[in-house]
Structure formats: C-alpha cells, structure tokens
Amino acid sequence: MPIKLPSFRPRKDAHPPDLWTKCPTCSEMLFNKQLDKADRVCPNCGHHFRLSAGARLDLLLDHGTFAELDAGLQSLDPLGFVDQKPYPDRVAAAQLATGLRDAAVRGTGLIEGHRVSICAMDFAFMGGSMGAVVGEKVTRAAEQALEERIPLIVVSASGGARMQEGTLALMQLAKTCAALDRLRVAGVPYISIMSDPTTGGVFASYAVLGDVNLAEPNALIGFAGARVTAGTIAQELPPGFQRAEFLFEHGFVDRVVTRRDLRHEVALLLRYLVPLEGAGGGNGNGAMSESRPSFDPIGFLSSLAEKVVPDLGPGDGLDAPESPRTSRPARTARTAGDAPAARRTGRRTADG
C-alpha cells in the first residue's frame, strides 16, 4: 500500500516587506517594532532614522494635546510645471504615500505643561521641500506665537525650496524671515530643531534663526551639497563637514541632543525662555512696543545715502560744494529756498 504523504500548501509571504530595517551606519538588521519603541534610533550605534511629522509631534508634545491648524492648505500649480510628470500628479502621489496634504504640519500643543506653537516637517513628502504651503504654515505658526505670546518651535527636515513652484517657493525665505524678525523684536522665544537633513532654502531661512538652535546627532545640515561646495572652493572638505557635530564645534548649532533627551531639553529651555512682558514686548494684536526701537529700513538707507553719495558741482546742475565749515542744516536751507535755486528753476522752465 503506497504511503500517502501529507500535502503542504505553498507558503505565502506572511512577512511584510517592511518588517526589518537595515541600519545604514552599522549594517545591523533591526526589527521595526523594536525600532519604533526606541524612537527610531538604532540600539547598536545610535543612528537616528528619519521621523514622520506625526511621530515627531508625538515625541515632543504631551499626549493628546496637539490641535492641528490649517490642515486644508494644499499646493496649487501656478506655473503649470511638468518634468517627468506634471506637478499635481507628484503632489497627489506624495499625499497618497504619506497621508499629508503637504510637507509641514502645524498647530498648538503642550510640552510638559508649556503651551507652544509648533510646526514639523516631513521629509517623506517630496523631500520635505518648501513650497508656498510650507512657508505659509511656518509664517502662520510664528504669527500665532506672536499673537498669543507663546514660544514657537519649528522642526526642520527638508531638501530645500520646491523647484516646481519656482520663484514662489523662493519668496517663502523672505516671508518666513520677516515673521521671525517680528517675533524676535517682540521678545517671543523661537526654538529651531534641525533633523536629518536640513539643507537648501530651509537652512538659508528659518532653520538657523532660532534663539536656540538644536540638532540631532549626525544630522546633515548645510546649504549646498558637499560635492558642490568642494568643487566651488576647490579644496578638500574636513571630516564630518556639514554634520551636526561639526556645526556645533564651529558655533553654528547650540546643542546636539539625542532624540531620547530632546523633549526634556526643549522643556528645560521653555522654562528659561519666557516671552517678554512690557518693555520690548508686543500687544495682543502683534504690534511692537514703542519702548524698544525697531529697525527702520527707509531711515537706514536715507542716512547711508547721505554719507555715500558725494555733493556735485555747479556743472552738474546742483549747488557747489559747501565749505567744510558750513553745517548740514544750512546747506539744506540754501538748497530749498535761496536765489540760485530759484534761478535754476527758471532756467529749466525757459529751456522747456
């Protein structure tokens, strides 16, 4: 009698493809569930993996205190940009992959009881590129911090400005810097957290303007890539160039903080960085107090022009240079109402 062997069904792929992650630093295979419990930090070498915006907010804020704002903002296609595929298709693909509307999430929350205005970026959304939506969310986060006089926290993770929006993306550099300057004049603290990577236009604008600049270990921080920089200056770059530790040694970053200690570090800073009240502060509408002078660009340029532009001679249609003993008010009065000025006016009228 033939022996009947049990039949085995073909084994299906019971393991999802993202069950394990290989550490790029030590090449260790890490179980994703254990990696998530360790806040996405390699337990062997301490490599900090990139975090999504939602995971970053959960890491920093008290549980259940985050209230998202401006969740409906979405990028448009004002330039009709097309490379390998149209820009709207790229945005739709990124939205489907990440579940976000754009590369930044902003809102309010508590960090150990301290209310803050916070904005976190997600590198998974088109490389965390800064378009009009990202710039608007950072600006609105700063404006809300100014209005409510609460600290501002921005977590950067970006490859720079979004090329599909062209000049509109570059304008966000000026817009965000202007909002942060109003925050600085009003005495409201701003803490910038730079994760891997923070480069390009984000690095050149709001990422490095914090009252305190924090960075995660070995985070790539810089404007242009190392290869471009080396080619531009025609020199070999030092070891660790554009890494967080290198920038800390050269005074560009205030602290390099591990992810496990980041929440406590920020909470400690919030105890010290208290928004100013009275002198140097703003009112509820965001207006500056008159007790602290602010920068006047028009007055600055006018005074600079008076120092730089030389007085012209009679052949140039203006008064002859005054003697060194003549004061500036006397020269101004003579130019405005003296007889030579009247004769010049009459000559122009006759010639015309």
Image: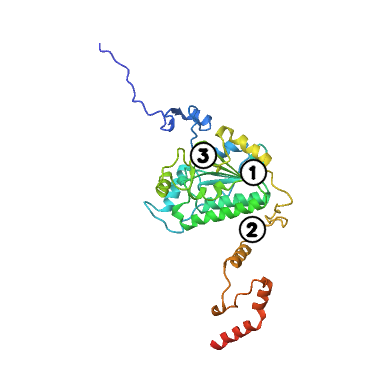
- What residue did someone put label 2 on? 295
Disc 3 residue type (three-letter): Ala
CB atoms at circles 1 and 2 under 8 Å apart?
no
Q: Earlier in the sequence, mark 1 or mark 2?
A: 1
Residue 111 in view (yes/no): no
* Residue lying at 36% horizontally and 25% vertically, measured from the top left: 11
Q: Picture quarter containing residue 267?
A: top right
Disc 2 from disc 3: Cα separation? 32 Å
Task: Determine whether the residue tagged by mark 2 lies in a helix, strand or loop.
Answer: loop
Q: Nearer the viewer, residue 288 or 246?
A: 246
| Image: 30 above or below 154 | above
Residue mark closest to the camera, 1 vs 2: 2
- Image quarter where the C terminus lies is bottom right
10 Å crowding of disc 2: few (<14), some (14-19), many (20+): few
Percent position of residue 59, x then y? 57, 36
Outermost left residue: 1
Give the position of the N terminus as an image quadrant: top left
Q: Which amino acid type is marked by label 2?
A: Phe
Locate residue 150 relative to residue 165 in the image: left or right.
right
Q: Which residue is mark 3?
A: 244
User: Residues under labels 1 and 2: Cα distance?
Assistant: 27 Å
Task: List the single residue furthest toward the top.
Answer: 1
Q: Left or right? Give the position of 118 relative to 243.
A: right
Q: Which sits earlier in the primary sequence, circle 2 or circle 3?
A: 3
Q: Are marks 3 and 1 in contact (CB under 8 Å)?
A: no
